[in-house]
Amino acid sequence: MKYMLLMTHQGSQADYQLTSWPAEDIKAHIDFMINFSQELTDSGELVTAEGLSGPDEAKLVRASGDGSPAVTDGPFPETKEWLAGFWIVDCDSAERACQIAARASAAPGVGGAPLNLAIEVRSVPAGPPDVEM
């Protein structure tokens, strides 16, 4: 079963600015993410993973009346949570997906302290139930 793990940051974008960290902490964090992704690749569980830009670069897009994109810029000052990155994993159970999420949550931050960011775990169904595809 596939699961999407959504790394959510609570707080302002400035609270999680990797570029403001000391160089050794940035390196430790990036090394962790590279090694973590390699472990998931080696186990056959990683489908894809990406970090995302901050909400200051976010765009909201809706179809206008004629179908063309109507784009609204961010940032959105009322936003208290924002998506920092995601993984899609293919593993045997929701329990295993939660184990992977907990490991991702503990990625090192400043001074090596675990970030303990919230990771939302959601299944990715193959299709609607009871509908032949």
Image (spheres, helix red, strand yellow):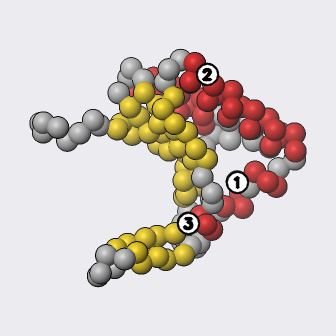
What residue do we see at 37% from left, 77% from top? 68
Q: CA distance from mark 1 to mark 2?
A: 25 Å
12 w.r.t. 105: above or below: below
Q: Nearer the viewer, residue 115 or 34?
A: 34
State which mark lies toward you, 1 or 3: 3
Amino acid carrying label 2: it is: Glu
Instruction: Report crowding for label 1: few under 14, some 14 to 19, many 20 or more residues within 10 A (C-alpha).
Output: some
In the image, is 131 to the left or to the right of 64? left
Q: Nearer the viewer, residue 105 or 64?
A: 64
| Residue 81, image x, y percentages | 54, 58
Q: Residue furthest bottom?
A: 65
Q: Residue furthest right?
A: 23
Identify the residue under disc 2. Answer: 39
Report if residue 121 is visible in the image: no
Whichever of callouts 1 and 3 sits on the residue coming sooner in the sequence is 1
| Residue 77, image x, y percentages | 58, 73
What residue do we see at 29% from left, 37% from top? 125
Whichever of callouts 1 and 2 sits on the residue coming sooner in the sequence is 1
Identify the residue under disc 1. Answer: 16
State the mark number for residue 116. none
Amino acid carrying label 1: it is: Tyr
Element under label 3?
A: loop
- Assign the C terminus to one quadrant of the image: top left
Amino acid carrying label 3: it is: Ala
Instruction: Report crowding for label 3: few under 14, some 14 to 19, many 20 or more residues within 10 A (C-alpha).
Output: some
In the image, is 56 to the left or to the right of 119? right
| Residue 14 in which image quadrant | bottom right
What residue do we see at 60% from left, 37% from top? 105
State the mark number for residue 58. 3
Q: CA distance from mark 3 to mark 2?
A: 30 Å
Element under label 2?
A: helix
